[in-house]
Image: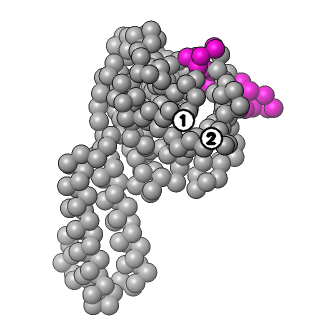
Amino acid sequence: MGPCATFVALLALGIFLNYLVQFSKVQTLPASEAPMAMWQRHQNEDLPERVRGVLWMRGNTCPELMLTLEAAAYDKASRELLLPFGTGYSWTYNSDFAGWLEYGAVTLNMAFLSPGKLRVVFDEDFRFGTVQISFLGMGLSGHLWGMNNTDDVGNFWDRVYWDDGKWLFRYDIKKVLDAGGKKLPVQSQMVNSTLSGTVVHGSTCGLTTQVKTYKQLLHGDFSLLQIFLSLLFFALWFGLAYFCFKDGTKAPYFHYNLL
């Protein structure tokens, strides 16, 4: 194996091992408990109260339920928020097959050191924000959405999208936990919808219907398991790299048998 091929193989292995570590950080919480866990993890007092707290994506037909913008990096001057996909306790996903697939996809972003981010830029009053997917610092063309606040305090929002020169309604968003961690009445409505198997109708993620699960997946923080896996995988990767390069670029044959 030549030096370039060896380097690429080791790089791919390193990314894969990092993916396994990131994927193992999954936590499963009931929809009734997940909002508080998210709020306890992320409290950004630099953000206006209107956009703080935990939001329920009520009409979203993707296999996801909640998010918090407080997990994002916030630039006061530009009123811009950048939220890397897969950030711990920032988003929740269904615990069914579709939810696990989406969780696996966003976790892949973490394995590649988070090139994909959700970018939100608000107006001066924080009543409307443009939403775009950013990859390596560049916005993806053809994907422009918005968040339009429909009340006076930031508890109700419309998720809109830009099409043919105008903003069109996609689905509604409701706040279930406010900036101070207070449970809002809407949270009971959200929890009951997951317990009763309420069918959500809409048109996101290429789906027209979705049932949200009571058990939700979250990307968590490092635990003793992840620390152990990180050390184990680093030792494995370092050992392979050492044997690959110690005699030029040739690695002992038995290592390939192990892989």
Q: Determine whether the residue tagged by mark 2 lies in a helix, strand or loop.
A: loop
User: Quick check: 158 left or right of 117?
Assistant: right
Report if residue 141 is visible in the image: yes
- Label for residue 76? 2
Q: Residue 206 at x, y = what percent? A: 56, 32
Q: How many marks?
A: 2
- Tags 1 and 2 touching, CB below 8 Å: yes
For image coordinates 44% across by 57% down, the residue present is: 112
Quadrant in which the C terminus is drawn: bottom left
Q: Residue 78 at x, y = what percent? A: 67, 42
Q: Determine whether the residue tagged by mark 1 lies in a helix, strand or loop.
A: loop
Q: Single out the residue that lies furthest toward the front.
A: 45
Q: Residues within 10 Å of mark 2 (few under 14, many from 20)?
A: few
Nearer the observer, 114 or 205: 114
Q: Single out the residue that lies furthest toward the right.
A: 165
Nearer the observer, 33 or 22: 33
Q: Mark 1 points at which residue?
A: 46
Report the predominant secondary structure element of the magenta stretch.
strand
Q: Disc 1 marks which amino acid?
A: Asp
- Disc with the residue nearer the chain's start (1 vs 2): 1
- 257, above or below 124, in the image: below
- 96, above or below 187, in the image: below
For image coordinates 41% across by 21% down, the residue present is: 181
Magenta region includes residue 161: yes
Q: What stretch is highlighted in magenta?
A: 151-168
For image coordinates 37% across by 78% down, the residue present is: 6
**The image quarter in which residue 59 lies:** top right
- Label for residue 189? none
